[in-house]
Amino acid sequence: MKRDFATIVVGLLFLGAGIIIGGVLLGFFDFDISLAGWWTIFIIAPALFSMAQSGVNAGNMIMLAVGVILLMNAQEIFPVYISWRLIFPIVLIAVGVQLLFGKSITCKSCGTGTDGKEQGTGDATRHQYTAFFAGQDVNYGNEVFTGASYTATFGAVTADLRNVTLNGDAVILVSALFGGIDIFLPKNVKLVSHVVPVLGGMESKFVSSQDPAAHTIIIRGTATFGGVSVQ
């Protein structure tokens, strides 16, 4: 199976970190390294993965900031009382940036599917919907669906696509941070999921179409302390 660039980069980061940390612990490398806060890699790496694969949004910006702040806390770079005070303004800044500049994003190339072919390529404008400490219902009528981006940060997004039609493959970008995203798909499509759960979950009850000519919906993103459900 062909790997996309974002997967390769994150895989190399994990591989390098494992070799360095393992070498230090086993005495193969003779230099000091502080392992305090090593567990924050499970927050930082998925955030970087989401940014590389799905673009920057409020969810992965907040996830990255929280991971970095926790790492600085563990490394005693920032005093605890300062670092924790940074989280709330960072959340506000991330949401502000999302609201001002995240109405739509342009996808030049959204990666590859499981068959190695380009999926969802082209200059497709993708509308973006964000729920922050709130809920948002996105209901589509009888229209052509070209893709979308859903972000739930301490909130919930419900997207009903059951009445849409596809003229080609489409990509849905998701980011659930302490929130939930529910997606209802039309029956005549195939589903490919590349959602990375980080202390969260991805649940799919959707049965892909068996029609070889059916178009594909690719769902990419992360579920961090939250969940993504597809039906």
Image (cartoon, grey):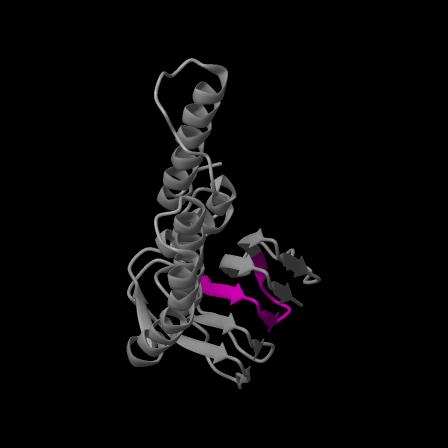
Residue 193: x percent and y percent?
56, 54
- Residue 35: give x, y in percent of width and height: 46, 34
Place residue 109 in its image quadrant.
bottom left
Could you tell me how many numbered marks the image carries? 0
In the rendered image, residue 175 lying in the magenta stretch gets the answer yes
In the figure, is residue 126 to the left or right of 196? Answer: left
Residue 204 belongs to magenta span: no
Across and down, in percent, residue 228 comes to 60, 64
Residue 21 vs 213, above or below: the answer is above
Can you name the residue that lies furthest to the top here?
A: 28
Q: In this rendering, would 203 be left or right of 82?
A: right
Identify the residue at image location x=55%, y=59%. Answer: 224
Task: Provide the major secondary structure of the magenta segment.
Answer: strand
Quadrant in the picture for residue 187: bottom right
Question: Which residue range is magenta in the image?
Answer: 169-191
Query: Where 198 sits versus 124, above or below?
Result: above
Relative image position of residue 164 (x, y in whole percent): 53, 78
Given residues 51 and 169, the one toward you in this image is 51
Residue visible at 28% across and 59% down in the picture: 108
Q: Quadrant of the C terminus?
A: bottom right
With respect to residue 131, does 84 lie above or below? above
Residue at 35% x, 80% y: name it: 99
Q: Is 73 positioned to the left or the right of 224 in the image? A: left
Q: Residue at x 43, y 21 (%)?
A: 24
- Classify residue 102 by image quadrant: bottom left
Q: Is residue 50 visible?
A: no
